[in-house]
Amino acid sequence: MEGKALRYLTAGETHGPQLTAIIEGMPSNVSINFEELNHQMRRRQKGYGRGRRMQIEQDTANIVGGVRHGKTTGAPIALIVENKDWTHWTKIMNIEPIEGTDEERRRVHRPRPGHADLNGGIKYNQTDLRNILERSSARETAARVAVGAVAKQLLSAFGIKVAGQVLRIGEVEAKRVELPIDELIETTEASPVRVVDKDAEAKMIAHIDEMKQEGDSIGGIVECIVEGAPVGLGSHVQWDRKLDGRIAQAVVSINAFKGCEIGIGFEASKLRGSKVHDEILHTEEKGYHRASNNAGGFEGGMTTGEPIVVRGVMKPIPTLYKPLRSVDIDTKEPFTAQVERSDACAVPAASVVLEHVVAWEVACAFLEKFGGDSMEETRRNYESYLAQVEQY
């Protein structure tokens, strides 16, 4: 959406020296907890089913601009995430021209099914598909988690908490258990597959092991919950100001994500309207609230004050040990695509990425609503609005 109060860009390649992100529009005087920032980075690398690259990288996000003495200054925030694997790719990924054979350059001319290789190569007229795969890699989500972790710290200052959990891995579905958000965070953090349901946890781990042995991969469903968002974030007045729509776009922009649900989502198609819509209640203690939250915290593209509930579906990772058919762009001859290194399942890590892209969109909507060039100004606007809501 044009004119967003908060925005970011990322740059960098999977085997380049670093990923870079720049955040613009963050108010001044937001306290930054660097240990918490890098805790979120480490969370993305955990999860049963990950490949050997997670043992190489050990990600940290270093802030190199826009923060001084632990607080944002109002200037753009620059973050870098170094790629430890760069030391093995310094010649291949050098920005300077190099001499050498295709093998020495590690030119890629065999597109992998399920990746951006072929259509990206056609679009950008690149006969070395490495120029596509290096940027289209899911490695870029490390920068997006770093950005979302900063957004989380802004939201946290206003009592808004973000959690995530895995609901399905392949054929195994976990029971969805309602827990207080702090307990949900603690429980899923202790699980190698980020689930609350311990029976499902054991089955998921066994299912991932089975896929590894077969040289295959599996996807799943992950959920993000945001508690504490005030009523009225987003807007009904234009299609691109609807916050649930913006969240859905952000979710399907995550590598390998192919769908998004808000609230009960597709389940609503099976039910009568009387069983779907959330009745409105009012009490002196809680003010306006809903008897249920089937809408997942949204009506008319705006938050209702109920928890935001978002789910995303991740397809199986397309980089497989099991051969898939493709065509060599040089010879136009068929071949079977094989790889040496891959994740069998990245669903637990995808849950962490989902949290951070949702947190970012909520933070954007929060600052659009309350504005402010400093935290003090934003807080005054926020508290004034809460008083208005209470009196309505």
Image (tube, rainbow, N blue to C red):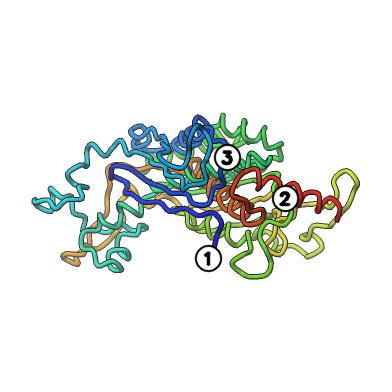
Residue 272: percent from left, percent from top: 78, 65
Q: Is residue 55 left or right of residue 351?
A: left
Tell me if residue 192 can be seen.
no
Q: In whole angstroms, how far apart are the C-alphas of marks 2 and 1?
A: 23 Å
Q: Which mark is residue 29?
A: 3
State which tag comes first along the sequence, 3 or 1.
Answer: 1
> What is the C-alpha distance between the residues marked 2 and 3?
22 Å
Task: Say which amino acid is labelled 2.
Answer: Pro
Residue under numbered circle 1: 2
In-front residue for pair 257/139: 139
Local crowd size for mark 1, using a 10 Å CA cut-off: few (<14), some (14–19), many (≥20): few
Cα gap from disc 3 to disc 1, whole angstroms: 25 Å
Question: Identity of the amino acid at label 3?
Answer: Asn
Crowdedness of circle 3 by 10 Å Cα count: few (<14), some, many (20+)? some
Quadrant showing the N terminus: bottom right
- Mark 2 and mark 3 lie on one chain; the one further toward the N terminus is 3
Q: Nearer the viewer, residue 26 or 187?
A: 26
Q: Secondary structure at mark 2?
A: loop
Query: Which secondary structure lies at badge 3?
Result: loop
Q: Find out whether the residues at labels 2 and 1 contact each other: C-beta distance under 8 Å.
A: no
Q: Name the residue at 78% across, 65% down.
A: 273
Work out whether residue 71 or residue 229 is closer to the camera in this orientation and state it.
Answer: 71
Q: Which quadrant of the figure contains the C terminus?
A: bottom right
Residue tagged 2: 230
Q: Nearer the viewer, mark 2 or mark 1?
A: 1
Mark closer to the chain start, 2 or 1:
1
**Residue found at the very far bottom of the displayed protein:** 238
For label 1, the SS is loop
x 53%, y 32%: residue = 33
| Residue depth check, mark 2 versus mark 3: number of the one nearer the observer | 3
